Amino acid sequence: MAQNGTPQNGVADGVPALPSPVTVQVIRHTKIFIGNEWHSSSSGRTFPTFNPATGVKICDVEEADERDVDKAVQVAKAAQQRSSPWRKMDGSCRGRLLHALADLMERDRRLLATLETRDTGKPFLQSFFIDLEGSIKTLRYYAGWADKIHGKSLPVDESFLCLTKHEPVGVCGAIIPVSP
């Protein structure tokens, strides 16, 4: 039977190597992401974000206001129109896109965990093993459902049939609070 730290189980000295943060030289994306494009805020305002553990400024981020949220909601509503490419896309293609996003997050997991740690001040391993792992698993879960959501038909009586079709209700703009 293989013991911890043997070549049979691939663990050297019984301790698996833990991931470590990466060195981040430049934060490249600080704009508002709407309609698959990066935008400056409509007001032109930015705000600094600081590492709460060190007090060191990380970067300046575009400050969204009501006009930016309205623009994002308009773009999201347009994506729900019957003629939009997203609406015409079948569920399996949507699922592949969600899996592709999860793949990219897995590929860049150390970088994303490093940025999360710098922005929130939480321990790196918590960002890596809890936050990123949870996000990746959530994307994969919903990617698996993308082509499996369908309606039902229920016989009401001999001359009527009740049909259900699951569709999005609408779009909302949400402000998500983050506490230090």
Image (tube, grey):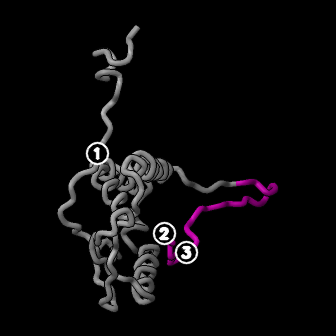
Viewer-proximal residue among 51 and 95:
51
Residue 166 seen: yes
Q: Which segment is the magenta one?
A: 154-180
Residue found at x 23% / y 67%: 27
Disc 3/disc 1 C-alpha distance (Å):
41 Å
Q: Which quadrant would the N terminus be assigned to in this image?
A: top left
* Residue 97 in the image, given as x and y percentages of width and height: 35, 56
The answer to whether 92 appears left or right of 13 in the picture is: right
For the residues carrying marks 3 and 2, which lies nearer the camera in this image? 2
Report which quarter residue 30 is drawn in. bottom left
* Crowding near the residue tagged with mark 3, few <14, some 14–19, many ≥20 C-alpha atoms within 10 Å: few
Viewer-proximal residue among 3 and 79:
3
Residue 155 located within the stretch drawn in magenta: yes
* Residue linked to disc 3: 170
Residue found at x 41% / y 45%: 129
Q: Earlier in the sequence, mark 3 or mark 1?
A: 1
Looking at the picture, which amino acid does disc 1 mark? Ser
Residue 136 located within the stretch drawn in magenta: no
Looking at the picture, which amino acid does disc 2 mark? Val
* Residue linked to disc 1: 20
